[in-house]
Amino acid sequence: MRTLWLLTLVLTTPALAGGRAHVGGALSVCVVARAIENDPLLADSPTDVATLLLTRTPLCRLVETSHPTPQVTRLTPLPGVAPGTVAAQLKDVLASTTAVRSLLAGVKSVTEVKGAVELTGATFELERVLCHPAFAIAPGPFHPGKDALIAATDLPDGRPWVDSVTVTPTDARTAERLLAQHKAQLVLGATAPDDAPQLFVLSLVFSPQLGPHLRQALESSVDRADLVRFFVKVPSAPLLTLLPPSLSGGPAAVPPRPPKPTPLSAAKELTLLYDASVDDERAIAERLQVKLQPNGYRVALKGLPRAELRAHHPADTELMLVNTLLPPSAPAALAVLLDVAGQRAKVAQVPADDAKAAKLALDVLADLPLWPLATHGLGVSASRDVQHLTRDTLGLPRLDDVFLSAE
């Protein structure tokens, strides 16, 4: 199943030093985060998702897909996976008030049948979409124990190599110090570059009522590269297009900066909403506040809990910073971003073909009330005894594949 559903990417760390696979041992992990979101419908930061996938498994690894009729997709769970659990997670995604609901665009019903689950209605390629963590269910490679996460022994893919994992949320300086002192073996959220795809996208969403003046003010006044350099942790990159380069055919050329618009004659009062749990978003919001002021916008900042922010669409005088984890599929990713931009009615127009979806993404960007800011991924630092550290299609580490050097 692993080779069927997941493209494994090798990290450029000492983690692949030679060594025979060794069962056993405890893996100590530091997560650079103030808090960790455990709801699969809300886990959309790299550290959230990497931690979530320790105790949950994406459905793409737990089901076999078939098509009894053109309008029916059947998901047959592997042995040990309950069809009811699969159906419940699919229904949760469909009923969600967040943009992940668009991953099942076109699905009219989810029905539990004998030994399987059937979806009626056309949807995007489920083989890729179901790898999104919004569809992750228990059990994962590890299950909660008293003081650590304990290796599961009854998974379709087999048990992890290590016996247990401890997860400690902390700040970046403490995490790097613990790694240097050999008190931790892995840091998730480190400022470390890598070549994995960056499918976490940060965008500024605004009311359509604000019109092209705001977009021109942003394009002429805000340098995305500077924002990324100073406020978004590596690995990251400025985003000039709606879809990230890994889904759109490569990075876009940097266009010439347009002239600044004539400042508004009367200052327009706006509120910029951001995720209160993410310090980087507060810093970016403050920078945007400063940059928009000379264009005639007086911007107040307001942090919201993530659940409230993801279910909210901007009012006429609101802007929102929104972080989104996209699936490794251009059509499904475009559907999610259209939903993020408050254009859910347009999701039905998204073609199923990757190239056509990527072209549509280029065509619609100028008309969307959404301004792309950056892509980012998960930086990982590992000690030398961590072996076989690989990444999945989302660019996240597969910690169930890791084993510890016997030396």
Image (cartoon, helix red, strand yellow):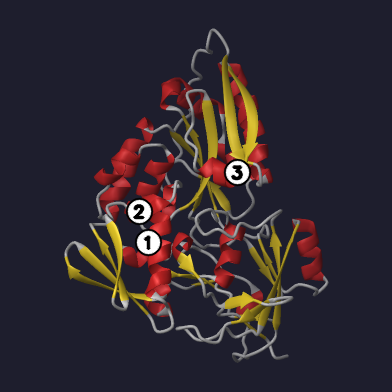
Q: Nearer the viewer, residue 80 or 365?
A: 80
What secondary structure is found at the residue carrying circle 1? helix
In the image shown, does 378 or 135 lie closer to the viewer? 135
- Tell me if residue 59 can be seen: no
Q: Indicate which disc residue 332 carries.
A: 2
Q: Residues within 10 Å of mark 3 (few under 14, many from 20)?
A: many
Does residue 317 appear to the left or right of 303 in the view shown?
left
Q: CA distance from mark 2 to mark 3?
A: 26 Å
Farthest-out residue, top:
265
Residue drawn at the location 62% of the way across and 54% of the way down: 234
Distance between mark 3 and mark 1 Cα atoms: 28 Å
The numbered dot on residue 228 is 3
Tag 3: residue type?
Answer: Val
Instruction: Identify the residue under disc 1.
Output: 129
Whether the residues at callouts 1 and 2 have beta carbons within 8 Å, the answer is: yes
Q: Position of residue 261 (x, y in %)?
A: 49, 17
Tell me if residue 343 comes above or below residue 236 in the rendering.
Answer: above
Q: Nearer the viewer, residue 70 or 13?
A: 70
Q: Residues within 10 Å of mark 1 (few under 14, many from 20)?
A: many
N-terminal of the pair, mark 2 or mark 3, is 3
